[in-house]
Image: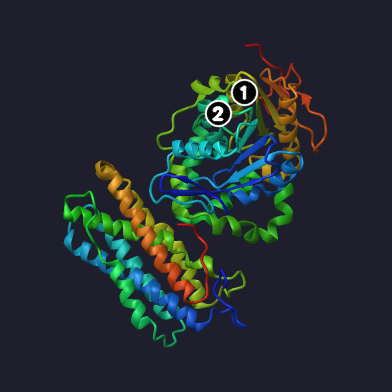
Amino acid sequence: MSALLGPLDSHGRVPPRQQTRVAAFLLSAHGALARHFAVALASQSGAARQAELNAQFYREAEIMSLLFHGTSWVPDLELAFLGPRWEAVWLLRPVSGVADRLQGSIIDLAALGHAVHAAIRPAALLPTDASPQDAFVQALRRIEFESGRLIQAQILFLKSAELAPVRDAVSAAVESRHAEVRKLWRGMLLGLGVRCDEPG
Amino acid sequence: MPYLHHGAYRIRYELVGPDQGPAYVLVNGLTQYAELWVGYRDALANKGFRVATFDLLGQGVSDKPGLFIGQDDQVAVLARLIEQLGAGPIFLSGISFGGLIALRYAIAHADRIAGLVAMSSFAELSPQLLLLGNALRTGLILGGTSYLQDLLLPMNLSDAWLGPQLQNLEAVKRQGWLTNDVYALQNLMESFFDFKPLTPLLAAISVPTMILNGEFDFLTPRALHETLRIHIPDSALVIIPRAYHAFTLEKAALTIDLLGRFAEDVLAKRWTGGQSVWIAPDEAGGPLVPFPSDYDHLRAIPARRVPA
């Protein structure tokens, strides 16, 4: 069991099976966020958050495009079982302690975005000798870097004065989403023989 | 790997050294992690101290709350760790952010410790420190942990240390980059949003206190340490020659020696703080020299002290 992806081939590339599984997971997570942002964008025409939702939607779409084009795809039959399990977790749900269902959904979307952008650090899985010229390596590094920026919208919203009256519920929603995302991410990596040693 | 619990969160800590010895607790700076104290841990344990190191809430292997980390939570975590150490004499030391947490603990629980070592610490956010902190936070947000490290390394370490590392900086940064998460560092930085100056409370620190300040500390310059010296009754300010903010990394042997001597002096009742000012030796084991009494230790040029 390793803490990193690999072993790399002689060109510093991650094995295609690992690329496929990791990319499928990231596509599932970021694709779900893109879908949620698209719906939110359509339903909040003229709202103050529209510009940020627009940016989030297109950045998530960019991440998906990077993965589509940067991954050396190989057949992976297990994805037929794993994919629906992952997708079920990305569904939005009410937030306990928030009576307004719409506000609860928005909080849950932000909590999910926070968890995906914070808890998943794909570049940290790359060995130091991974080829910086490889498209998959570049994609993972770019996704992690962009996640650090994308999360700012979630942080601003979740810490906003608007949500101060339901701060405990918001914090609980974020912790819950973090726990779910970390569990899925670690489980997916374990399936590849990669152990992600984190508490929680 | 043992863990403490603070609410739903887990705090990774480690105790090394004799069970019955006096204890040293070392508190990390903002971007640090417990392994950076390994040299201190082993050296102080060899001197007979029981040494406690840990990752603060939001750091390293400890849990990282998603949204909010209050400094009161860090003090509570530290209190929980110190509870583990029994009734023997306990020396508490922290650097930078960790120094601030140690100061806050000492204000609230001075009766629980035998001595305090505040390193590159502060009790107030001066305009410079406030603006630097804001800029560092923006750097973290826009450029990630790696960019924050790029800003901090040249700010906090000397040319003499950086020079030989220039071709190896990515490797130097890697563990810190792996261990720290952007959102968690951001939470630690944002714990200053409701920060109130500690200066009016410093007099509550009744224990012997050694204040260590790098000669060239740019991030927390002399004036911030002077506030500690003036307001902590049994304090002494020790200036580390040719050192910057992160002298615990750069001058570990000297700092370990100073920590050990401080505790030994306190235990032997030889310590005399007296709000005095000293110059540390260049190397471990050398004598501390009183700062010339007729010169102003707040100046960077040899200016005569102006009577208050």
Q: Tag 1's secondary structure?
A: loop
Callout 2, which amino acid? Ala
If the image is split into quadrants, where does the N terminus of chain A sit? bottom right
The one nearer the camera, A75 or A46, is A75
Identify the disc placed on residue B207.
Answer: 1
Residue contact between numbered discs 1 and 2, judged by CB atoms under 8 Å: yes
Callout 1, which amino acid? Val
B78 up-or-down from A63: above or below: above
Identify the disc placed on residue B34.
Answer: none
Identify the disc placed on residue B106.
Answer: 2
How is the model colour-coded? rainbow
Q: Residue furthest bottom?
A: A75
Residue A28 lies, in percent from the top left, at 34, 73
Please report, as a chain letter, where disc 1 is located. B
Q: Which residue lies at the image location 61% right of the left edge and 69% below the top edge?
A: A128
If the image is split into quadrants, where does the C terminus of chain A sit? bottom left
> Callout 2: few (<14), some (14-19), or many (20+) C-alpha neighbours within 10 Å?
many
Residue A50 lies, in percent from the top left, at 24, 57
Residue B152 lies, in percent from the top left, at 58, 47
Residue A144 lies, in percent from the top left, at 46, 64
Q: Quadrant of residue B295?
A: top right
Q: Tag 2's secondary structure?
A: helix
Q: Which residue lies at the image location 64% right of the left edge and 31% below the top edge?
A: B88
